[in-house]
Image (cartoon, rainbow, N blue to C red):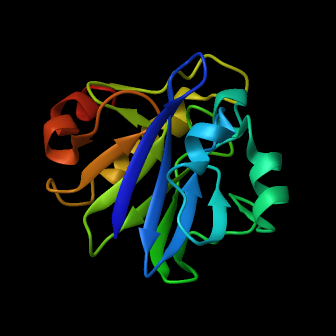
Amino acid sequence: MIIKCVKVGPLETNCYILIKDGKSLVIDPGDDLNKIEKLIQDEVQGVIITHYHFDHIGVLNDILSKYKTKVYDYRNLSEGYNKIGPFEFKVLFTPGHKEDAISILFEGDKKLFSGDFIFNGSIGRCDLEGGNYQDMQRSIKKVLNYEDNIIIYPGHGEKTTLGAERKNLMSYL
């Protein structure tokens, strides 16, 4: 699986385009359709939204319309194993930053797309509408069950690993 990242919008949201077998999967199309389209290959299998904040969904309707695909989120993905085209992954419900937050784990590839749940050196804010610190703590406990070598692809900033974030995450508990 190839992972391409483009920073979009005024908050520099990371939009990820995953490519496998000539198919694309878009995660969090925050803004700037032109930048995102340059990275899309062939058929778009779907768009995953990690949570519904404006900076993660800015051009969602444009992509759905243009590529005749559908959106996947906390409402139509089940916690646990899911498959969209050639993409097989686990969904973790990770509320805290927002009540509808999910993270996407490609367990075999050791890659976690965390939205605004975990950042390099930090976690998502819990003081915005839909946020809840106790939910964040439960989400942190859930992710701490996974291996340190998982690479975290956050909604903003640079990637990191669960191992690099473990001590910091534990401090929030």
Rendering quarter of residue 85: bottom right
Task: Give the left or right position of residue 84, taking residue 121 as reference.
Answer: right
Comparing 67 with 73, the one in front is 67
Q: In this view, does 61 lie above or below 125?
A: below
Q: Quadrant of the N terminus?
A: bottom left
What residue lies at 27% left-to-right and 76% top-to-bottom?
108
What residue lies at 31% left-to-right and 71% top-to-bottom?
107
Residue 52 x %, y %? 72, 39
Comparing 72 with 80, the one in front is 72
Task: Give the left or right position of residue 166, taking residue 155 as reference.
Answer: left
What residue lies at 75% left-to-right and 53% top-to-bottom?
63
Residue 98 x %, y %? 64, 35
Rendering quarter of residue 159: top left
Residue 18 x %, y %? 45, 62
Residue 135, visible in the rendered structure = yes
Task: Give the left or right position of residue 42, taking residue 73 as reference.
Answer: left
What residue lies at 49% left-to-right and 55% top-to-bottom?
17
Q: In which quarter of the image is the C terminus?
A: top left
Residue 69 x %, y %? 76, 68
Q: In this view, does 83 lie above or below 28?
A: below
